[in-house]
Image: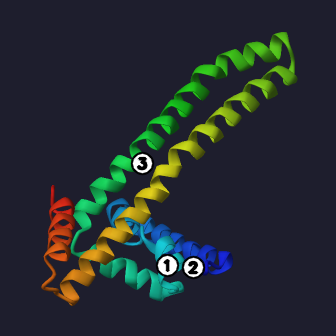
Amino acid sequence: LQFALLPAFLTRLLALGIFLFGLVLCILPGIMVAVFLCLVTPIVAFEDLRGLAACRRSYDLVRSHRGAVFWRLTVLLLPWLLVFVIRVVLLYAVEPAMLAGLAIGGPETIYNILWLLNIGYSLLMSLLLLPLSDGQMILWHNLTALQRQDVNPTTDAAAEDTGAAVKEQLNDE
């Protein structure tokens, strides 16, 4: 396994640029682009593809299972979104306290409150995004196994059972 950090970063940056372009067009196309490009990191890591080739490969893998992939990514991102909303609410709730702190304790009090909120937020977000990486790897593994099953059908009963289980799992919705 050879993983080059710079090509992975540049490919992810390209995917982000395409995603942001999709968001400019409209929110829904941006979300669909994000779903189609969700596998670029594992593809760069395990298939040694870079740039647009990795983006095309991700699209090819996700294309026929986009609904299942979308719902799995939604479930993986739900805790992250919840923490983000809580942070926004806390910042608005803490704003009057920060103004009072400015009157009572000065700018250091505000700085300390914001510092604690940002440290807690960063730690939570880091922990909650770990399952997303694992989920991407699992999705990539299942979709490539399914594609191999479709391209090279085998008579091996165990391989057929595995392929059927993966298909059933992905088409569960």
Quarter in which the C terminus is drawn: bottom left
Among numbered discs 3 and 1, the one appearing first in the sequence:
1
Q: In front here: 126 or 55? A: 126
Q: Secondary structure at mark 1?
A: helix
Residue where numbered disc 1 is placed: 46
Three-letter code, disc 3:
Leu
Q: Residue at x 65, y 22 (%)?
A: 95
The answer to whether marks 2 and 1 mark residues whose Cβ atoms lie closer than 8 Å is: yes
Percent coordinates x, y for residue 90 in the rendering: 57, 25
Task: Specify whether 101 is left or right of 136.
Answer: right
Percent coordinates x, y for residue 75 in the rendering: 34, 47
Task: Specify whether 52 is left or right of 153.
Answer: right
Three-letter code, disc 2:
Leu
The colour scheme is rainbow
Callout 3: few (<14), some (14-19), or many (20+) C-alpha neighbours within 10 Å?
A: some
Measure the C-alpha gap from mark 3 to mark 2: 28 Å
Q: Secondary structure at mark 3?
A: helix
| Front of the two marks 3 and 1 | 1
Percent coordinates x, y for residue 37 in the rendering: 41, 72
Measure the C-alpha gap from mark 3 to mark 1: 23 Å
Residue where numbered disc 2 is placed: 1
| Front of the two marks 3 and 2 | 2
Q: In front here: 14 or 20? A: 14
> Compared to 37, does 129 lie above or below?
above
Q: In front here: 16 or 24? A: 16
> Compared to 96, does 76 lie above or below?
below
Q: Residue at x 27, y 83 (%)?
A: 148
Quarter in which the N terminus is drawn: bottom right
